Image (tube, grey):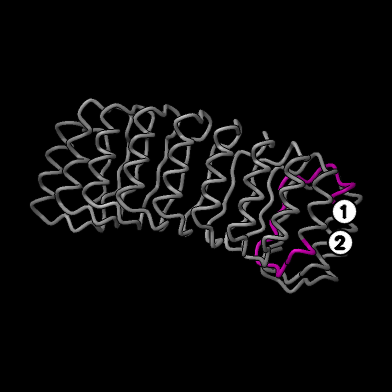
Amino acid sequence: LQKNTIGPVGAQQMADTLKQNRNLKELIFSSNSIGDGGAGALAKALKVNQGLESLDLQSNSISDAGVAALMGALCANKTLVSLNLRENSISSEGARELARALCINSTLKNLDLTANLLHDQGAQAIAVAMRENQALTSLHLQWNFIQAGAAKALGQALQLNRSLTSLDLQENAIGDEGASAVASALKANMALTALYLQVASIGSRGAQALGDALAVNRTLEILDLRGNAIGVAGAKALANALKVNSSLRRLNLQENSLGMDGAIFIATALSGNHGLQHINLQGNHIGESGARMISDAIRTNAPSCIVEM
């Protein structure tokens, strides 16, 4: 039912149906202009519905009032496992309602808050809740005006949380300070398998902290650093980590100002690393001669690893 003009009245009609329905498992209701009124109607249905597992409310002009209603329902609902609230108008106030619900709910596994207005205060509230919540496995916070303060709070949460396997912080300016905080958590965390830090204002210092973490972490499988500026020094730090890390499967260093030297550091580090399956080195001004040297190094050190240049 996505991309229609259902509006709050149509949402009310759907909600009335959901109160009786026990068979529907997934409802894709994105881009329907249901607003807070429609969200409130659906929330009332979720309090009694015991069948729906996935609800997609992306791009529906839902603000804090609508989220408060939905979170009230989440405290009672025991079947919903996936909730998509991307591209709405949820601020730090709505995030606090989300946090309260996460401290109570024990069934939701996937929460997508991409492209809202959480800022540091909202993300910090969610981070505090993640210390208690042991159900959520995937949290998307992309493009939410999050900075280092919230990244620190999330790092502290990761040291205690044992359920989250995927964290998306891309397009938030967490910088080296924020990246270092998350990296510190990776030294203790044994659950996270995917970390997305694309376009996050991370430089060489943040990359060095991540490298130190990868040298001891044994669970992270995906690290995406596309669109940062880790440079040669950052590449060298990650390369040193790759020499001892055996869990990482995919590493994206696209558009990171590595140059030929940085890319060669990464390529030559693969000798003895039998875990890495895919590396992206595109957009790093490697040049033809550099590409040849890297290709030779890959063939020698890790012939099964796919490298994009």
Q: Position of residue 240 (x, y in %)?
A: 25, 34
The region drawn magenta spans: 44-66
Quadrant housing the N terminus: bottom right
Residue 34, given in percent of the width and then of the height, sits at: 77, 69
Element under disc 2: helix
- Report whether 293 appears left or right of 196: left
Name which residue type carries label 2: Ala
Residue position for label 2 = 41
Identify whether 266 is placed above or below 113.
above
Residue 122, placed above or below residue 307: below
Q: Residue at x 77, y 46 (%)?
A: 101
x and y percentages locating residue 229 in the rendered image: 30, 56
Where 3 falls versus 269 (above or below)? Answer: below
Q: In this view of the protein, which residue sits in the foreground, 24 or 40?
A: 40
Q: Which residue sits furthest bottom? A: 5
**Tag 1 secondary structure:** helix
Which residue is more in the foreground, 28 or 215? 215
Q: Is residue 74 left or right of residue 155?
A: right
For residue 199, side relative to residue 229 (left or right): right
